[in-house]
Image (cartoon, rainbow, N blue to C red):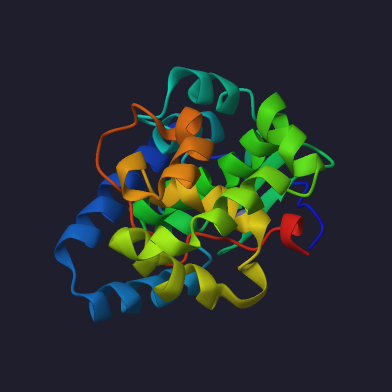
Amino acid sequence: MAAPHGELKRAAVPNAMGHVVLSFAERTLRPDELAGLREQLWRSQTYLYVTPGPLLIDRALDGFPAEVRALGARCPFFRYDARGGGGYWPDRNEIWLAAGVETYEGLRQVRLSACHELFHFVCWNHPRYRADEDRGFARLRKAVAASRSVVKDYPRYRGWVTASFLRQGDHANVVEYFADIPTNFRETSELPPLIAAHFGPLIRHSGSGCATSMASCVRTSRCS
Ligand SMILES: [Zn+2]
């Protein structure tokens, strides 16, 4: 997929009103009612709420270490007119995320999707992690391989690998693994020690609430 070009801009007042409606709908409607509302809204391609890029970066990286937040804040992050999809384009060093993610996938999902894409950006722009990416993720692959015998002792990690990550088909690759770990694990104690050590600088001190994302990845050109 080629990177989108047209940024969708939203006026502040309708956007704020849309946020009230969307969060109310998410809290009060049954899943089938919410699905029905979404289908109705999509007939007129309505976006109730679209988080502006810089604000979404701030929300997605809430609780991550200051260095990661500062790096993420440098990322050009745009919203565009589509129901779903988007990604990080390393050739442009930009993230483009569909404007429909909040309305059609949910307010929680948009933070997870943004977090995932931001860690593609972090990987590409952080000297230490970029050096490993340039060597085909040799250090990370080694940490994962050397952790095999202890994975059974980390049930949440093992469950995520088998029930979620490996089921992504083409997406179950090392580039996606890198972006998924900080998105899904905010406590290094849930990870095998060598993997925890690799990601430690990115997630240490993050503490607050752990996210479990079943389908955090939106399709990106990173993965093709
Ligand atoms: Zn990805």
- The location of residue 28, given as percent across then percent down, is 15, 63
* Frontmost residue, 150 versus 122: 150
* Frontmost residue, 155 versus 28: 155
Which quadrant contains ligand 1?
A: bottom right
Does 188 appear above or below 81?
A: above
Quadrant (top left, top right, bottom left, bottom right) of the N terminus: bottom right
Q: In the picture provided, is 174 more to the left or to the right than 143?
A: right
- The location of residue 44, given as percent across then percent down, is 51, 68
Residue 49 seen by the camera: no
Residue 112 seen by the camera: yes
Does 203 appear above or below 182?
A: above
Q: In the picture provided, is 223 more to the left or to the right than 186?
A: right
Q: Give the quadrant of residue 222.
A: bottom right
- The location of residue 26, given as percent across then percent down, is 24, 60
Does 108 appear above or below 53?
A: below
For the point 53% across and 48% down, the residue is 116
Does 153 appear above or below 164?
A: above
Quadrant (top left, top right, bottom left, bottom right) of the C terminus: bottom right
For the point 57% across and 28% down, the residue is 72
For the point 58% across and 41% down, the residue is 119
* Frontmost residue, 116 versus 81: 116
- The location of residue 131, given as percent across then percent down, is 76, 33
